[in-house]
Image (cartoon, grey):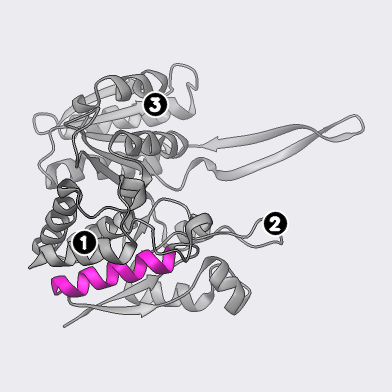
Amino acid sequence: MATPVTLIPGDGIGPSIADATVRILAAAGADVEWDRQVAGMAGVARWNDPIPDATLDSIKRTRVALKGPLETPVGEGFRSINVALRKTFDLYANVRPAHTIVPGRFDNVDIVLVRENTEGLYIGVEHYVKIGDDPKAAAESVAIITRHGSERIVRYAFDYAIAHNRQKVTLVHKANILKFSQGLFLDVGRLIAREYEGRVHFEERIIDAMAMHLVMRPEQFDVVVTTNLFGDILSDEISGLVGGLGLAPGANFGTNTAIFEAVHGTAPDIAGRNIANPGALVLAACMMLDHIGDRGRAEHIRHAFEGTIRDGAVLTRDLGGTSTTDEFTDAVIARLG
């Protein structure tokens, strides 16, 4: 029986890379029933809402979604798409794997970044402070870290490590300065780590030192867990170590729902030109197949995708080639056999 999955092609290059991804999964024999929905600017155009109720209802029904890059309209009172999805489905764990496909400056990068997705500065508790006649004389943003949120994200990282035969979890923090909020995150992390002692190695890194070590010796890191803002920054840095956001898939997990995505933007400058690299969404779809229990087919697609890149004959422009999206997709499909 086919697994129902909500498909949100997205904006800009989204429809192009979504179609490429659907073609590749179909060629691999993935038993998926797509429920196509809209969000972002396509949602505004159709429903005057960047995250329409019909789309939310579809995700509630399928509990699994694959989405391309989305554009949230600036101003005009529209709600943030990502915030709406995280709040609606309590998507507390953002998982971003990155590994070397073509050796270059770094040959052995294989890192999974686990980012807390619902707390910290991104929770959006902020306001202006009036001083004298200036209503915006100062601005305050509050970073909220809870014991519950810290426990579940750190435990998720350790459970992920065990499930995927990973050896080490690195907790990244700034508790030397932010002693209460980051200190709570660190304290909870240490407590959780004791439960996994002897099974998974645990270490701590301060965020600024971590950023440095990532560009010096990234091969020393395995699973990295951190808070929302730090995770946002480090995940892009880690993606840069293996070729950029065009090869960076992402997944957002809650208790009952998972949403998989290309983490790059909509790239409006190349939209409609059939030259976008579908890699990030293809790899996100592989993570989706892992999630629904089709790991063998996910690995088959990954091998075909990575083999196409290593071969170097058919590559999109961002990968150093001149091929179109369709040509690259055809090359991956040809390798599926």
- Check whether the beta carbons of the residues at disc 3 and disc 1 lie within 8 A of each other: no
The region drawn magenta spans 14-30
Instruction: Look at discs 2 and 1 and give the one toward the viewer.
Output: 2
Seen at 66% across and 56% down, the residue is 74
Q: Nearer the viewer, residue 203 or 97?
A: 97
Q: Is residue 227 visible?
A: yes
Mark 1 lies on residue: 291
| Neighbour tally class for label 3: few under 14, some 14-19, many 20 plus, Cα within 10 Å | many
Location of residue 336 in the rendering, given as x and y in whole percent from the top left corner? 11, 65
Nearest the eye: 161 or 155: 161
Element under disc 1? helix
| Mark 3 vs mark 1: in front | 1
Q: Is residue 272 magenta?
A: no
Q: Amino acid at mark 3?
A: His
Q: Is label 3 in a helix, a strand or a loop?
A: strand
Residue at the limit of the structure toward the bottom, as seen here: 1
Question: Which corner quadrant holds the N terminus?
Answer: bottom left
**In whole angstroms, how far apart are the C-alphas of marks 3 and 2?**
33 Å
- Residue type, label 1: His
In the figure, residue 32 lies in which quadrant? bottom left
**Position of the C terminus by quadrant:** bottom left
Residue where numbered disc 2 is placed: 75
Q: Position of residue 217 (x, y in %)?
A: 24, 21
- Distance (Cα) linking label 2 and label 1: 36 Å
Mark toward the start of the polypeptide (3 vs 1):
3
**Could you say where residue 285 lies in the image, as x and y percent from the top left?**
26, 62
What is the number of the mark on residue 173? 3
The x, y position of residue 301, in whole percent, is 15, 61
Q: Secondary structure at mark 2?
A: loop
The residues tagged by marks 3 and 1 sit, at their Cα atoms, a distance apart of 29 Å
Graded by Cα atoms within 10 Å as few (under 14), some (14 to 19) or many (20 or more), the crowding at tag 1 reads some
